[in-house]
Image (tube, grey):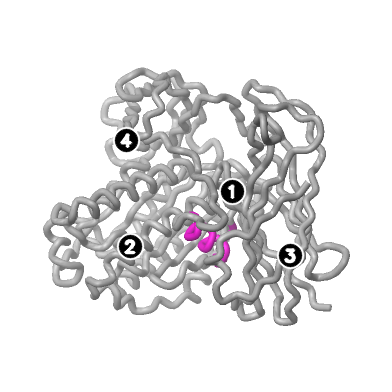
């Protein structure tokens, strides 16, 4: 009934860890479900098919840039690699905006009462942006918020990132004043690294990690997300002069980033707070040579590839923020099943959406690459990307909802916990001649003191076989409960649980208080 192995020795450096006592318990399976498309009480449509579906979030604007929200399915034509596609599902613009009667003030609220609602994610890039430009960006954001009603129509998440810290300033909320207060309490450090060419690689890395980190954290929320990135993005760098291997690595990172943003239904908008000012002496010579974003050609392309836009060349940053936010609540959603059966992951599938209205402009993602599934987990020598993703979730104050699970305190004491993974978040492998069906996942538990300092970290991989009479293949909705005993430490006041399902690559987190005796 239970199989657990130590995982990720790199995680345990500098930490005192004792092997936990683990108990695995399988929940009872539900009855067989339908294989046809189904719709739940919230209107969520579920398709069951072995053929991948493509979901497009589309914004249509008129000649003045104002969103058009009264189109119907018959107005849209979709092509993939110039081949017409049949639209299987269509949603009107703004169909998922939360009801005014709802109040959302956390990720838990969002997933519980508005699982399909569109959201806004505002990222303050403080590692690639000069101090004076960041100050102007903060001023512009507050200016934009001052014009909004007290209760925002779209739940908004506020994040600030520098080279050392990834900080969620406020979880999802519709309370405008709470966002303003969180912004006022946040102090920006002087980003001296923007003046040091030796830090270029680190700044590129932080940009990619931040995009990936946010996408993985919000993956479990199926609604559309607008990410408004306020900052310079990638540092100025003329890639035409780079070595071939550097260009290849950068292009691969961009491709992977576009894919994960797509999977999370994120549309990226980049806003340059420097406005019309481009001073090569401040942002490097490539700032004047490459493009108006200061040489950030690849970062601008990230935004366009996801269906967003790179906004620059204006000093009214608050108006640019307003434009990006407005798009986020005015999108249509189309779903189609590609007629192309090729599984070549190197072939870019170009998407074209057209409408029969001259002068209207369509914004949606440009296309996609097929993705391989997550790589196999090696408990003794995990990949660098796996370690990075898990460390990001383990040490973050951001809620990850990619894997639904709950943590409850056990009966024997404050260090006993029952971790229940919901069946809808697990993937059960098909049975083979040598192995029964099983679910593989990673569990990381870290404890913290009252100042937020990490005390202990324990990481383990699990391979739980499906007991009883189960079909060898096909859908299997079955939950798993792990009984976990954390190490006793009188200083520990909080434990963070991180779960990653190996077959899907999705990550979930939960925080639990450790009650004093």
Instruction: Tell me whether circle 1 and circle 2 mark residues in contact (CB < 8 Å).
Output: no
Badge 3, how many Cα within 10 Å: few under 14, some, many 20+? few
> Is the C terminus in the top left, top right, bottom left or bottom right quadrant?
bottom right
Q: Which residue is mark 2?
A: 231
Quick one: label 4, few (<14), some, or many (20+) residues within 10 Å?
Answer: some
User: What separation in Å lies between label 1 and label 2 (alpha carbons)?
Assistant: 27 Å
Where residue 232 sits in the image (x, y, percent)?
29, 62
The residue that disc 4 covers is 62
Q: CA distance from mark 4 to mark 1?
A: 36 Å
Quarter assignment of residue 128: bottom left
The residue indicated by pointer 3 is 20
Is 317 situated left or right of 380 in this image?
Answer: left
- Tell me the crowding category of disc 1: few under 14, some 14 to 19, or many 20 or more residues within 10 angstroms, Cα based: many
| Quadrant housing residue 293 | bottom left
Contact (Cβ within 8 Å) of mark 4 with mark 1: no
The answer to whether residue 467 is visible is: yes
Q: Which mark is in front, 3 or 2?
A: 3
**To which residue does mark 1 refer?**
402
> Residue 15's x, y, as percent?
60, 75
Query: Which one is earlier in the sequence, the residue at label 4 or at label 3?
Result: 3
Relative to residue 315, is residue 61 drawn left or right? right
**Is 130 above or below relative to 152?**
below
């Amino acid at each position: 009934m239970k199989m657990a192995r130590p995982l990720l020795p790199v995680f345990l450096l500098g930490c005192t860890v004792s092997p936990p006592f683990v108990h695995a318990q399988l929940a009872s399976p539900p009855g067989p479900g339908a294989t046809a498309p189904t719709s739940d009480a919230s209107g969520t449509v579920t398709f069951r098919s072995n053929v991948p579906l493509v979901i497009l979030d589309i914004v249509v604007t008129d000649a003045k840039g104002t969103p058009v929200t009264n189109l119907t399915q018959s107005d849209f034509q979709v092509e993939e690699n110039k081949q017409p596609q049949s639209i299987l599902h269509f949603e009107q613009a703004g169909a998922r905006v939360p009801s005014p009667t709802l109040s959302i003030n956390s990720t838990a609220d969002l997933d519980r009462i508005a699982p399909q609602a569109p959201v806004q994610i505002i990222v303050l890039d403080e590692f690639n942006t000069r101090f004076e430009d960041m100050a102007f960006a903060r001023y512009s954001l507050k200016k934009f918020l001052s014009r909004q009603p007290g209760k925002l129509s779209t739940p908004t998440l506020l994040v600030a990132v520098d080279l050392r810290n990834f900080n969620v300033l406020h979880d999802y909320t519709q309370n405008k004043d709470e966002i303003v207060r969180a912004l006022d309490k946040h102090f920006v450090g002087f980003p001296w690294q923007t003046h040091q060419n030796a830090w270029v690689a680190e700044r590129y890395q932080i940009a990619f990690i931040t995009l990936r980190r946010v996408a993985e954290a919000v993956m479990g929320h199926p609604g559309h997300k607008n990410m408004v990135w306020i900052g310079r993005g990638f540092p100025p760098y003329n890639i035409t002069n780079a070595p071939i291997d550097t260009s290849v690595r950068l292009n691969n990172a961009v491709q992977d980033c576009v894919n994960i943003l797509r999977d999370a239904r994120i549309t990226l908008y980049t806003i340059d707070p420097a406005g019309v000012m481009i001073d090569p002496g401040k942002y490097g010579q490539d700032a004047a040579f490459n493009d108006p974003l200061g040489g950030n050609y690849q970062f601008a392309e990230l935004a366009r590839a996801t269906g967003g836009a790179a906004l620059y060349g204006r000093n009214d940053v608050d108006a640019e923020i307003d434009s990006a936010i407005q798009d986020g609540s005015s999108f249509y959603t189309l779903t189609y099943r590609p007629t192309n059966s090729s599984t070549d992951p190197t072939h870019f599938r170009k998407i074209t959406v057209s409408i029969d209205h001259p002068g209207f402009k369509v914004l949606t993602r440009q296309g996609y690459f097929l993705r391989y599934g997550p790589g196999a987990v090696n408990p003794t020598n995990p990949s660098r990307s796996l370690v990075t993703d898990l460390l990001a979730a383990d040490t973050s104050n951001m809620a990850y909802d990619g894997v639904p699970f709950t943590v409850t305190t056990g009966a024997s004491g404050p260090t006993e916990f029952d971790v229940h993974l919901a069946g809808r978040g697990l993937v059960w492998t098909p049975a083979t001649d040598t192995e029964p069906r099983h679910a593989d996942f990673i569990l990381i538990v870290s404890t913290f003191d009252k100042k937020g300092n990490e005390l202990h970290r324990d990481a383990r991989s699990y391979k739980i076989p499906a007991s009883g009479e189960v079909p060898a293949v096909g859908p299997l909705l079955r939950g798993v409960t792990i009984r976990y005993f954390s190490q006793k430490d009188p200083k520990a006041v909080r434990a963070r649980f991180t779960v990653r399902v190996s077959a899907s690559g999705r990550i979930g987190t939960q925080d639990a208080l450790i009650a004093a005796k």
